[in-house]
Image: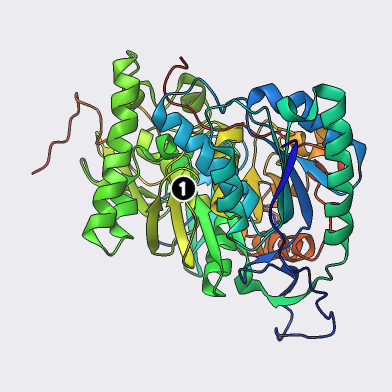
């Protein structure tokens, strides 16, 4: 396995973790379930932060470690940095997404 | 009576030729009279109360082969805490890594010393007691204790380890001094080993309940029995209540500003990154602090996040080894169980090299997969279970702190 720039922690994840500081416009190759996914980064993604592997609709679940870690506050595009701006915990009181 | 003997298990010599394991996944174990298997052969010197710690430490330091187990309590404690102290000391004495036990008592402590000696001796081990108030003070008790200890060490040294299957292993998993690399590299690598050990028939115990807040929804899905699910949820609620009574909002305070800067967005994400070290297998039971681990598979023990308290609880429960992940680097060890230090942070591995046993950073650097590095860690687990000393053991780290909830009287 050669050097990779992001890590997918579980086959069901829709985000990957940056293993180095990544720049907007950078092309990334990710192997998920044996399939190669190619992404162009829509924003800078610092080391340790998350990048969306696919489009996530508003209030859709963000999945890491094979489990939901919260919901998308706004629609998240593939290649976008996923963090406090567009992801919310289901534990906090003030949140955009309520159970439907 | 200055000294009394509770029991004298027959110390039979066990032949070393016999092999009851096949393939590569064997460990070198010491079979105890109760049928449990230890990977170390310590004689534990345990003070039954804080007043006996100096004497106990001097006795233990006089001879090779003895291991000192610290205890700051044993008196002036409210009942639930005295019970926890008792259970922890009894559990450490009964841990299969311990061959025999010397208890050092003051004489007037609230902790019931004879009952403690009997509880440990019911596992078939030799337990002896020296009592400071009966022996004539510090130096006389040290002299007496050293003479007794010498005999225990000689007897223990006659035991020969033999091969056992890896399914005899009971491993505690813990993270401490975490950083952004813990949830990405070190914990997933330990999680790989946890799954492998469980799949091979062994046992994993994961602790630090406060770190599970935010991952309850995932954990309960892995528990078959409704009563066990309720037990976990009740334990988590108890921690939230304790924090709330002190004005601490655990959920609101997580993730911390430092976590957010490191890329953690939600409490769910932080907790999932912590519990991944226990792997993904079904959870068989929820144990009280220092409760004996009786079955096989994956267990959760309800302990604080505090590293030394958590380790003491799991080792008292019967863990023979600890897999400890750290981002910042910590030297912590344990008096009877080897602690393997794993970091996913390449800078920490370089800076804290003398305290680190395993470098999981190839995952972080994108050079190797979690399963490739996990296989390497599993090999180290086998080596340590065959006698290789960990850094914490070589450096003499024997930190031991018993959990405590209430104020002392």
Task: Identify the image quadrant of residue B125.
Answer: bottom right
Q: Would residue B193 be found to the left or right of residue A95 on screen? A: right
Q: Is residue B364 visible?
A: yes
Residue beneath the point at 39% across and 64% down? B282
Q: Would residue B380 be found to the left or right of residue B144 on screen? A: left
| Residue A12 location (% of width, % of height) | 38, 60
Q: Is residue B104 above or below residue B389?
A: above
Disc 1 element: helix
Q: Would residue B168 be found to the left or right of residue B156 on screen? A: left
Q: Residue furthest front?
A: B1
| Residue B401 location (% of width, % of height) | 61, 31
How many residues crowd around disc 1 within 10 Å: few (fewer than 14), some, or many (20 or more)? many
Q: How many numbered dots are placed on residues in this image?
A: 1
Which quadrant holds the N terminus of chain B? top right
Viewer-side residue, B406 vs B21: B406
Mark 1 — residue? Answer: B275
Viewer-side residue, B230 vs B292: B292
| Residue B70 location (% of width, % of height) | 69, 32
Residue beneath the point at 39% across and 60% down? B283
Residue beneath the point at 64% across and 45% down? B324
Q: Chain of mark 1?
A: B
Residue beneath the point at 67% across and 54% down? B321
Q: Is residue B174 visible?
A: no
């Amino acid at each position: 396995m050669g050097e990779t720039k992001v890590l997918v922690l579980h086959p069901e994840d829709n985000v990957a973790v940056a293993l180095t500081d990544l720049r907007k416009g950078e092309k990334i190759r990710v192997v998920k379930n044996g399939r190669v996914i190619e992404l162009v980064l829509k924003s800078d993604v610092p080391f340790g932060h998350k990048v969306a592997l696919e489009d996530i609709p508003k209030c859709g679940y963000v999945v890491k470690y094979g489990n939901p870690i919260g919901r998308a506050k706004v629609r998240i595009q593939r290649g976008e940095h996923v963090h406090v701006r567009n992801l919310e915990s289901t534990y906090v009181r003030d949140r955009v997404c309520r159970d439907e | 009576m200055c000294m009394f003997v509770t029991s004298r298990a027959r110390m039979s010599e066990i032949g070393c030729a016999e092999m009851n394991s096949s393939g590569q996944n064997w460990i070198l174990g010491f079979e105890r009279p109760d049928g449990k298997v230890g990977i170390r052969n310590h004689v534990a010197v345990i003070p039954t109360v804080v007043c006996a710690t100096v004497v106990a430490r001097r006795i233990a330091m006089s001879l090779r082969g003895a291991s000192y187990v610290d205890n700051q309590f044993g008196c002036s404690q409210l009942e639930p805490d005295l019970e926890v102290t008792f259970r922890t000391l009894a559990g450490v004495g009964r841990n299969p890594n311990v061959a025999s036990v010397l208890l050092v008592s003051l004489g007037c402590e609230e902790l019931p010393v004879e009952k403690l000696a009997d509880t440990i001796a019911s596992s078939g081990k030799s337990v002896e007691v020296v009592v400071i108030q009966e022996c004539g003070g510090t130096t006389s008790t040290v002299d007496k204790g050293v003479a007794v200890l010498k005999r225990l060490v000689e007897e223990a040294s006659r035991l020969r380890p033999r091969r056992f299957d890896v399914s005899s292993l009971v491993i505690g998993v813990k993270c401490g001094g975490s950083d952004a690399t813990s949830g990405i590299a070190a914990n997933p690598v330990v999680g790989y080993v946890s799954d492998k050990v469980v799949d091979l028939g062994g046992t994993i115990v994961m602790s630090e309940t406060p770190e599970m807040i935010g991952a309850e929804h995932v954990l309960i899905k892995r528990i078959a029995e409704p009563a066990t699910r309720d037990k976990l949820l009740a334990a988590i609620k108890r921690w939230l209540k304790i924090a709330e009574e002190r004005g601490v909002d655990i959920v609101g305070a997580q993730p911390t500003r430092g976590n957010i800067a490191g890329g953690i967005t939600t409490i769910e994400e932080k907790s999932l990154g912590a519990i991944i070290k226990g792997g993904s297998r079904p959870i068989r039971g929820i144990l009280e602090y220092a409760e004996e681990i009786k079955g096989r598979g994956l267990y959760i023990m309800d302990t604080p996040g505090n590293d030394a308290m958590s380790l003491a609880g799991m080792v008292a429960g019967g863990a023979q080894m600890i897999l400890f992940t750290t981002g910042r680097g910590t030297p912590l060890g344990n008096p009877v169980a080897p602690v393997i230090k794993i970091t996913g942070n390449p800078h920490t591995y370089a800076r804290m090299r003398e305290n680190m046993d395993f470098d999981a950073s190839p995952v972080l650097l994108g050079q190797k997969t979690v399963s490739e590095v996990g296989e390497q860690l599993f090999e180290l687990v086998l080596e340590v279970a065959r006698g290789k000393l960990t850094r914490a053991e070589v450096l003499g780290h024997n930190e031991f702190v018993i959990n405590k909830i209430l104020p002392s009287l």
